Structures are given as C-alpha cells and as structure tokens.
Image (spheres, helix red, strand yellow):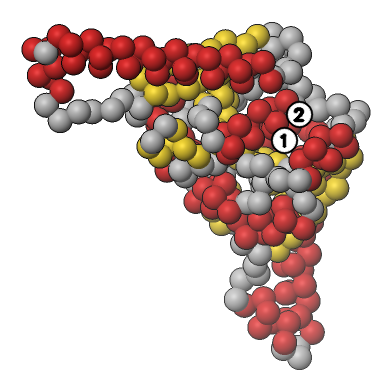
Amino acid sequence: MESVKQGDNTMNIVMALDRSRHARAAIQVLQQMCWPTGSTLTLLHVLEIVTISGGWQLHYHPELWKQFVGERRKLLAQAQRFLERMEAQLQVGDTRVGKMVKWGSPLTGILEALKKQQADLVVVGSRGLSGVRRFLLGSVSEGLLHAAPCSVLISRGRGKRRGERSAKGLRILVAVDESEHALAAARWLRALRLPAAEVTILHVVGPPEDCVPQLLTLKAPRFRESAQAVIRMTNERGGQVLKLARKALAYRGLTIHPVLAEGHPAEEIIRTATRSHADLVILGSRGMTGLKGAFLGSVSRRVARHAPCSVLVVKTR
C-alpha cells in the first residue's frame, strides 16, 4: 500500500520540531502544500532524556529528587508552549492539528510516534539543535530514511528566495524511473493538490555500455547503426517513462517540463535540482531504471544529503 491511502486519500502527518531554524523551515514547506481534506498533522517535540551518574540515588535525597522532578516538569511545560507557538504560525486549512511531547532519544522517539499515529508522512529538518544536545544532525533524518515506516520529507530552507517562491508557487523536481516506487512519487504530488506549481519530471538513463561508444567509432556502417539503435531504443524507453509520469500528473494548475538525462541518477537529480532552482525534489525510495539498479536506497540517501532544497522520499508499503 502506498503512503497515500487509496481509500479516502487522507493523510496522517507527523512534523518533528526542535528549536533550530532548520526544523522551523519545515513549517514554511508544509504550508505551501494542500493536504487532502480530513488529514491530520501532529506536531512532535522530543525531549532527550538527560542521564545523571548515580541518579538512582536521588530517591534517597528527597530535596534533590524534588528539584529533579521539578526541572523535568519545567522542560515539559516549555516544550508544550513551544509547540503552541509553532501551531499558531501554521495555516493548514482544514487539516486537524495535534501536539505531542515525548521523552527519549530523538530517532527512537520519532519512530515510536510514527507507529502510534500510523503516519503516512514524517517531516523533519535536515539538521538542527535541541537543548544542549544534538538533534536531527543528519543522523536522525538519515535514520528516518532507513527506518521510518512511511514517506519522509526532509525540509531545507532556501534563504531569501523562499518568500518569493511562495507567492509564485513551488518549483518541484520529480525523479522517475520504470519502477512502481517512482510512479508512486508522481501520484504523491498529484495528491498534494498544489494550486500552482512548476514541475520538472526527470528520467535518468544510465550511460551507454562500454561497447556502444566503441561501435560508434568504427567505420563499418552496420556497427554504427547497431550502436545508434541501442541509443535510440534507450531514449524511446525513457520517453515512455516520462509520458506515463506526465499522464499521472496531468491536472489543472501544473506547468510540466519533461527532461530526459543521461548519467548516474543521484548526480543528475542533484544537478537538475540546482539548475532548475527547485524548492522540492520528490523521488521513490528504491526501484530500477533501465537494466541497472538506481533508486536502491543509496540514491535517495545521496539526494537527501546533497540536494540544495527539500527532499520528499516516497515509500510504498
């Protein structure tokens, strides 16, 4: 089953927030999307448990224990007020908003919340800080890419241009191949019902086999024709992939630019995202392209790590 439910298309979204600018950038990204009617959004803040050497002995010192419990309550109240301030900044239409504060390690706490909420999507900042300890410093967001049972949106702010983009609509890059995982990425974009967006659909074909360039250099016409036929078939197959993806995205409000590129998937996705000034890259978590593995986890991780913009990695269930 895809992360976008087939029945009513509602979504359960969990947005993990800390107090850093990286995590708060998720709010701007989230507000530019139109979630299906009846969707729910849970704002999550994980308070990391501070361990104290010999802390178990606090039970024998009532005053120290009282101070310790009081400090925990203070941190909890601060976290709840923080989420209330974040909720006040949100404008998400008829999406129902809830708040959750958990104690634990960041990654474990988020994974537990995703399971409890039966989440379809988790939104995190690419990195940031929480209290005095590191939170969402790449290891958490990458841990979610590996372990989350749902799709993962890693938000990354675009600096001064962000306000300008929000007025004109998002620039989105959808990377597709021939797999069901990649087509699911295109269907995710359709489910978001963006009022206006400029979409680049990218399909990357792998570099030709070693024999193809060699055949092109030979004088015998039949060898050159064979090499040209291989290139032509590859491009035609790529064109069909783009045609299917474009058909999946065909609805009012989108300006679509299909792009066929040759090279290694991760590098071409990052390069195209940079050239098109994309605000968001959407791709499947794994799959196949041509005759070789492409979106096999390593590509989505590399894109999520190095893309100049936010990245949505769509997982199918």
Q: Nearer the viewer, residue 228 or 118?
A: 118
Q: Nearer the viewer, residue 295 or 276?
A: 276
Q: Secondary structure at mark 1?
A: helix
Pointer 1 residue: 186
Residue 145 position within the rendered picture, expressed as x and y whole percent measured from the top left: 49, 38
Residue 91 position within the rendered picture, expressed as x and y whole percent measured from the top left: 74, 18
Q: Nearer the viewer, residue 263 or 273?
A: 273
| Residue 155 versus residue 108 in the image, above or below | below
Identify the residue at horizontal 62%, vertical 11% (top origin): 97
Pointer 2 local density, CA inside 10 Å: few below 14, some 14–19, many at least 20? some
Pointer 2 residue: 32
| Residue 146 versus residue 222 in the image, above or below | above
Q: Secondary structure at mark 2?
A: loop
Which amino acid is tagged 1?
Answer: Ala
Residue 8 appears anywhere in the view:
no
| 21 with respect to 253 (left or right) | left
Q: Quadrant of residue 85?
A: top right
| 186 with respect to 125 (left or right) | right
Q: Earlier in the sequence, mark 1 or mark 2?
A: 2
Residue 238 position within the rendered picture, expressed as x and y whole percent measured from the top left: 75, 53
Identify the residue at horizontal 73%, vertical 82% (top origin): 216
Residue 221 position within the rendered picture, expressed as x and y whole percent measured from the top left: 79, 84
Which amino acid is tagged 2?
Answer: Gln
Number of the front mark, 1 or 2? 2
Q: Quadrant of residue 12?
A: top right
